[in-house]
Image (cartoon, helix red, strand yellow):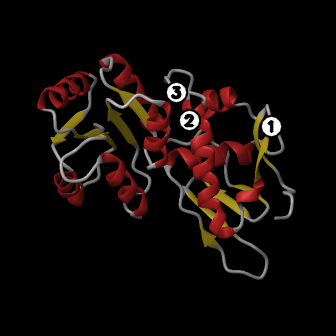
């Protein structure tokens, strides 16, 4: 089945450049110039991935990414943010808004395709781990669901984006081990993608935020100077 990419970009020349390269790489492409048209395009069929420009008429890509992440139907949709903003603070803002990756203009079409491929690879499980349990957390790769099941309480679902799901799956399959940012990039993002180590911190923050409503954020620990781990015995908050 051909993967479909929705390009939300208001500069026709850039949108066309992206579309030509994606089409040559074997993807089906749809182009729109603003967010309301993007929503209309998603109504009947969700794309496999969205390439989203930061600066758009009417509503910014940052605001639109936040809305997509707040909607159950589009929460897990991979988002690649595309913008001329290149400062670190801008990159963090884009990632914090819900984007899974960030490409600055001008960009290399080959790099863009590599990032698209890497994002789409992340939708598949890291490995056939089978169901995983750690404390109250239960992760089932077959249904792609995560539940928090505390004693004397009904199970509560945990809503995760695709990258946060893969992070949690990798952590739960390898508990009590300290994972450096470099190791997490290799295992969760894949070693063929151009991602900065700071990106890991953003997604760890997002994972903790998703686990906080079910009181499971404290299971993810920061090991100063080394990285992160998931523990079966968190410090009481």
Q: Position of residue 11 (x, y in %)?
A: 15, 33
Residue highlighted by disc 1: 224
Which mark is first along the chain, 2 or 1? Answer: 2
Marks 1 and 2 sit apart, C-alpha to C-alpha, by 17 Å
Percent from the top left, x then y, of residue 113?
A: 35, 24
Compared across the picture, whether 11 is left or right of 105 comes to left
What residue lies at 67% left-to-right and 69% top-to-bottom? 214
Q: In which quarter of the image is the N terminus?
A: top left
| Along the line of sight, the residue nearer the viewer: 204 or 44 | 204
The residue that mark 2 highlights is 199
Residue density around tag 1, few if under 14, some if 14–19, many if 20 or more, within 10 Å? few
Q: What element carries label 3?
A: loop
SS at mark 1? loop
Up/down of 184 relative to 158, above or below? above
Residue 173 placement, left or right of 58? right
Which mark, residue 195? 3
Say if 27 sits above or below 171 in the image: above
């Amino acid at each position: 089945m051909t993967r479909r990419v929705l390009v939300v970009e208001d500069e026709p020349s850039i949108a066309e450049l992206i579309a030509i390269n994606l089409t040559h790489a074997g993807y089906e492409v749809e182009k729109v110039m603003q967010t309301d048209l993007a929503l209309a395009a998603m109504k009947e069929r969700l794309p496999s991935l969205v390439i989203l420009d930061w600066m758009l008429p009417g509503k910014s890509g940052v605001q639109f990414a936040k809305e997509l992440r707040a909607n159950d139907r589009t929460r897990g949709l991979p988002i690649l943010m595309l913008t001329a903003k290149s400062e670190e603070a801008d990159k963090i803002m884009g990632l914090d808004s819900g984007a899974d990756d960030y490409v600055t203009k001008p960009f290399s079409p080959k790099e863009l395709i590599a990032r698209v491929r890497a994002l789409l690879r992340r939708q598949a499980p890291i490995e056939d781990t089978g169901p995983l349990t750690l404390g109250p957390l239960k992760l089932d790769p077959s249904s792609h669901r995560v539940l928090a099941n505390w004693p004397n309480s009904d199970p509560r679902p945990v809503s995760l984006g695709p990258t946060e799901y893969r992070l949690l799956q990798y952590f739960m399959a390898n508990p009590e081990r300290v994972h450096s940012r470099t190791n997490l990039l290799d295992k969760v993002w894949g070693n063929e993608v151009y991602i900065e180590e700071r990106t890991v911190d953003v997604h760890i923050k997002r994972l903790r935020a998703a686990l906080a409503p079910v009181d499971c954020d404290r299971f993810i620990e920061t090991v100063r100077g080394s990285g992160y781990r998931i523990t079966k015995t968190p410090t009481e908050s």
